[in-house]
Amino acid sequence: KAQYLQPSHRIFIGVPGSRASTEQSDMCVDTATQIAKNFHNSYVITAEKEVDAIAQLESLLEELGATVVDFTAPAQSLPIVTIFTTDRDSRACRWMMAECLRKGCIPVAMPPTTLKKVKLLSANCKLQIQNKVRTDPIGDKLDLTQDIPSFKGKNVLCVGVDTCHVAKATVGAMVGVLLLDGEKKNRSNNNTSSGNGPTQSMISTFWRVDVRGQELQQVTDNFRSIITQAESIVGKLDEIVVMQDGSVFSELQSMKRCVPAGCQLTFTCLHKRTNIRFHHEGHNGALIANNIRGTVVQALTPSVRNSSNVAPSFHIQSHDPAMSTARSLQVTVHCSSPTLSNQDLQQLLFTLSHASTFVPTKLPLPTRLAHKLASKVERLMDADPSFKQEQLRDALKYRIWYL
C-alpha cells in the first residue's frame, strides 16, 4: 500500500460558474450537499460567487482552528477542499484553488452531476483525495532493488525538472523522489503503524522567472534546496539522478557544485518529441508494428560528424500506444556516475515509467510529476500572479496536490 495521511477536514464547496444556468447552479449545490454525506468530518459551503465562497472558507477554517498550525511541519494533516463548478478551467476557479493553497488546503476541482450519478462521483472524489494526500508516490509494490541490485542499501534521489514557457514568464518545477529499498520501506511502515506518521519520499518546488536569463540561478537554488531536504529525511545521499525534460543542459556545471561530498551525479536530458520512429516488420508481408515495451536502441542515435563533444545517448520505449506509431524517448547522458552503469540507468527509466500510473508512460515518474506541477502552477499564476512557492506550507511540498 502507498502511505496516506488522512485529511484533517473535508470541505465541499458548490459554486456555479459565471455562465452557469439556474439548473446548473442547483446541480452544483445538490452535488456538494449529497457527496458530503458520504464522508465523515465534512462541511458544505454554497455561494453564488467565488469571492464569497473563499470568505466563507476562511471563516470556517478559523472556527475549526485549521489556520493556527505549524507551517514547517511536514507530516501535518491538511484540509481537503473539493470545489464543484461547471467551469473548472475558468480564471475564477483557478484563483479559488490558489487561495485554498495559501490557506493550507489541498484543492480538488470537479464537475457537478445529477443525483443518479452521485455515488459514482463520490467514489471518484475519494480516489482524488487519496492521490493528493499521498506522501509516497511509488508505494510498497515497487522495489527497485529487485530490478537494480546496485541500489541495495543506497539512498538514491531522482530529480525531475521541467519548465513551462509562456509569453510573459517562465514557470519551472522540480520534483525529487527518494528511492528506498525493501528493508527501509519496512522500517518506514513500522514507523507509520507506531504513530510516527508516514515517511516523506517526495519533495516538490516551483518558481517563476519574469526576465529571461535568470532560469539558471533558480534551477540551481531549488536543486540545492531539494538535496538539503532529502538529506534531512534520509541522511546521507549516495546517488542523484537528474531527469530533465528537454535538451538544455546549461545548468549542469552549477548543479555539480551542489552535490554533497561522497555522492555521485547522473544528469540526463529527456527528449520526448523526437522525429525518429522505430518499428519491426513481420515475416511474409506481415503488418508493421511498434516495438515491444522495454526496447532500447543505442546504435541509431544521430550525432554531429567529427565532433568529440557529443554526449552518449540512446532511445528507449517504455509505453505501448495501441492506436498510433510509438515515439521513443531519446535520453542524452551529459554526466554519468561511475557507480551507475548505462544498463542500470536504462532499467531505472523503464521501471519509473510504470510507477504510480495505470498505463506505462513515456516519461519516468519524477519528470512526469515535474511536468504536471509546472503546468498546474502556470495556470494558477495566470489567474493569480502573486501566487508563490513561499506562500505554501511545508506539508504541501510532500503531497502530490497537483495531480
Image (cartoon, grey):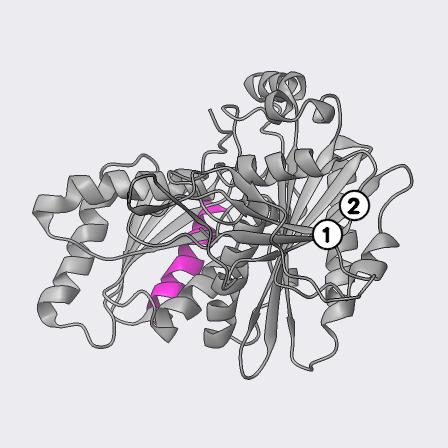
Q: Position of residue 183 (x, y in %)?
A: 66, 16
Residue 45 seen in the figure: yes
Reading the image, the residue beneath label 2 is 336
SS under mark 2? loop
Type of the residue with mark 2: Ser
Q: Position of residue 225 (x, y in %)?
A: 76, 52
Which residue corresponds to mark 1?
312
Q: Residue at coordinates 52% horizontally, 62% vertically from top-left?
A: 274
Residue 44 marker: none
Q: Mark 1 packing: few (<14 Cα in 10 Å), some, or many (20+)?
A: some
Mark 1 or 2 closer to N-term?
Answer: 1
* Secondary structure category for the residue under label 1: loop
Query: Image point 54% across, 52% down: which residue?
Result: 329
Circles 1 and 2: CB distance less than 8 Å? yes
Question: Image check: 348 left or right of 278?
Answer: right
Percent position of residue 232, x then y: 77, 38
- Read off the magenta span: 52-65
Residue 92 vertical placement versus 219 (above, below): below
Q: Amino acid at mark 1?
A: Pro
* Lateral position of residue 316 relative to residue 257, left or right: left
For marks 1 and 2, give the one nearer the viewer: 1
Q: Position of residue 234 (x, y in %)?
A: 75, 31
Mark 2 Cα within 10 Å, few/some/many (few <14, many 20+)? some
Residue 136 shows in the view:
no
Q: Is residue 183 magenta?
A: no
